Amino acid sequence: MGTASEPYTEGFVLGTPGLVCRWRLAGGHVVAQGRHLRALAARRVNGERITPEMLAWVRQHLEWTLEPGASGNPEGVLMIIVDDKGQAAMSVGPYEPLSSLTLPDIFFRANSAREEASKTGVAPETMWFVSNDHLICDIAVGSAASGTTSLIEDLARTVGMTVERRSGASDAAQRGLLDFQEAFLVSDEHGVVPAEGHGGARSARFKESYEKLCASKRER
């Protein structure tokens, strides 16, 4: 994989995107930045891991150019695009909430993220279930978690909840083979998103914790 390149400079042409990361901003800061960087290091483009040089480039831009770059959209989304030649660009855009929170639409997003993970190694969104007072996350045991997924895993353990990674849990739920009381999406872009009609105390608690983290970023 090649080295990172500066976006929007003369002669810079971004090729076919091989990886697109969308990280939520709060007060012009990346929410759970350290976790996102660790997850980025586990991602692949065309079968190759993100290089240390690319990671250094991302860190440099987060430290030096994110604040002025996010001034127009401090509550927006940071996008990192890596093309098939290993060139990268970063930009900030406005945040747009999900237009539909129905369970089928939430399932669709999680399924799309799993397909992405089959190519890049990390799913940017995961499906979660509260089942008989413990948590099930639709992610394979031993696989790399996205920044926000790892955050919720750690938060759950902090409050004493068991977290089970179970690949295929979403498929089982859609076929009526998984008994669950709550269902929610965990997203690097959207945070914690309870499915319409399938929320509850547990998912509300995780959503509140995520929003408190966002608030702490705004106070910096």
Image (cartoon, rainbow, N blue to C red):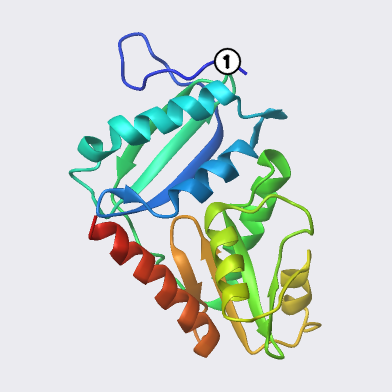
In the image, residue 158 sits, relative to residue 7, either above or below, namely: below
Identify which residue is drawn at 60% across, 37% down. 41
Identify which residue is drawn at 42% across, 16% down. 13
Instruction: Give the image quarter of residue 47.
Output: top right
Q: Amino acid at mark 1?
A: Gly
Front residue of this view, candidates 208 and 1: 208
In the image, residue 202 sits, relative to residue 218, either above or below, namely: below
Q: Position of residue 139 (x, y in %)?
A: 72, 61
Front residue of this view, candidates 212 and 23: 212
In the image, residue 58 sits, relative to residue 94, either above or below, namely: above
Would you say 23 lies left or right of 139 here?
A: left
How packed is label 1: few (under 14 Cα within 10 Å), some, or many (20 or more)? some
How many marks can you see?
Answer: 1
Label 1 element class: loop
Instruction: Say whether residue 102 is visible.
Output: yes
**Quarter of the image where the N terminus is located:** top right
**Quarter of the image where the C terminus is located:** bottom left
Instruction: Give the image quarter of residue 19.
Output: top right
Instruction: Say whether residue 200 is visible.
Output: no
Q: Position of residue 133 (x, y in %)?
A: 68, 89
Q: Position of residue 20 (x, y in %)?
A: 51, 39
Q: Residue furthest top?
A: 11
Check disc 1 and report the residue beneath it: 2
In the image, residue 184 sits, relative to residue 5, either above or below, namely: below
Identify which residue is drawn at 77% across, 58% down. 140
Q: Position of residue 73 (x, y in %)?
A: 23, 48
